[in-house]
Amino acid sequence: MTPFAPAVYADRRRRAAAQAAAAGLAGVLVTPGPDLRYFLGYTPAADTERLTLLAIPASDDGGSDAVAVVPKLEAHDLEVGAVGGIEAVTWSDGEDEHEVAGRLLRPDGRYAISDAAWALHVLGLQRALPASSYAAVTNALPMLRAAKSPEEVARLAAAGAGADAVFAEIVTRRFAGRAEREVSDDLDALLRSHGHEQVDFTLVCAGENGADPHHEAGDRVIREGDMVVMDFGGLADGYGSDTTRTVHVGAPTAREQEVHDVVRAAQQAGVDAVRPGATCQDVDRASRTVIADAGFGEFFVHRTGHGIGLTTHEPPYMVEGESTPIEAGMCFSVEPGIYLPGEFGVRIEDIVVAFPAGVPGLADTPDAGVRLNTSPHEVVVVE
Ligand code: ZN
Ligand code: ZN
Ligand code: ZN
């Protein structure tokens, strides 16, 4: 992905240091993956058993003396990929890398550590510093990457536009007579041709398979009369897309149209719930109420949405019990669905940014959410 300016990463580390201090943590420990890309703009050539760790000590005065612990044989990569200003401590094969890292940490500190940190390393740090303790970032500091900067929103918008172009193209192709897997392969190729360097999922769920929200495309041949749920996305220039539309092969029945209308209204209600002062669970409640009022409540079997950024699924979650207020720059999906076992399913999903300001190409909208997907919401009829 195209790196941001060095100051962007330094600012993110300062905010993390302040959030850690406010949460009573000794700091944030970052391992390879989206967190390391976020705080250092660095991805090791391979995420192996060798420890790479960025330690951001808690600080409430804005000072940040983050230090990276890297395998000596990868130190060159870090210099090439790094954005500057980070002290790096190297360790060599044969050394105890957890002792090396432990010397940089508070012996009795409680640290937030990346969700995807290898257990090998969490346990190694625990052994090196028996009085220290660790919590997953998602539990200790769930909103660390949740509010996106204008530059990040612009990348998410570009990824969304790419996904919308994929939808516009796929509905011009033939569905009837082809297996789900063939349409899924088309979606994969189209995502790559529309700027995605990574494809995370290309679900194609025809007819009764649509009643399974995470059905994997298979050999089922699509027929005239099928509802077809398509949910696809991945990463474009490092940032995620994720959109769902439900199309119909030929004209839908009155019942199919009714169910689609309910989901469409529920999706609109979820987007409309993004208002100053609203919480994440308000979005879920708004969508769920529409579906329940229409008599389909028991068939909406998942949360309404999830955050998106350097990954396609991350906090904040639009789910009952998530009382975090929606903040400017949060980007998340609104994706209600109705799943009728043995019949069909309908889901409609857009990525929404809350209260965007200063995003190139997006009007400042201080009091509402703005969709980053603009594919049509009505049932698109395919052949
Ligand atoms: Zn049908
Ligand atoms: Zn999706
Ligand atoms: Zn999603």
Image: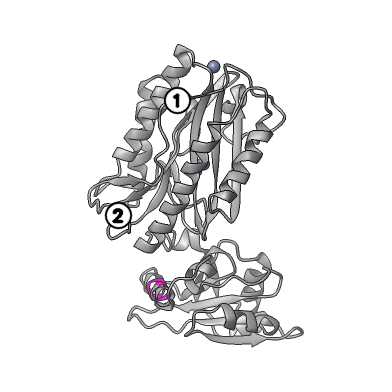
**In the displayed structure, would residue 301 be above or below residue 52?**
above
Q: Secondary structure at mark 1?
A: loop
Q: Residue at x 53, y 49 (%)?
A: 194
Q: Residues within 10 Å of mark 1 (few under 14, many from 20)?
A: some
Q: Main secondary structure of the magenta part?
A: helix
Looking at the image, the residue that sits furthest to the right is: 94
Q: Which residue is mark 1?
A: 379
Q: Which mark is residue 356?
A: 2
Confirm whether the magenta stretch covers residue 302. no
Q: Secondary structure at mark 2?
A: loop
Percent position (x, y) of residue 197?
59, 56
Inspect the image, locate mark 1, and give the three-letter code of the amino acid beneath it: Val
Image-quadrant location for residue 269 = top left
**Magenta residues (range):** 12-17
Image-quadrant location for residue 144 = bottom left
Inspect the image, locate mark 2, and give the three-letter code of the amino acid beneath it: Pro
Percent position (x, y) of residue 41?
51, 72
- Indicate if the residue with disc 1 has its beta carbon within 8 Å of ligand 1: no
Image-quadrant location for residue 42 = bottom right
Q: Is 164 placed left or right of 124 in the picture?
A: left
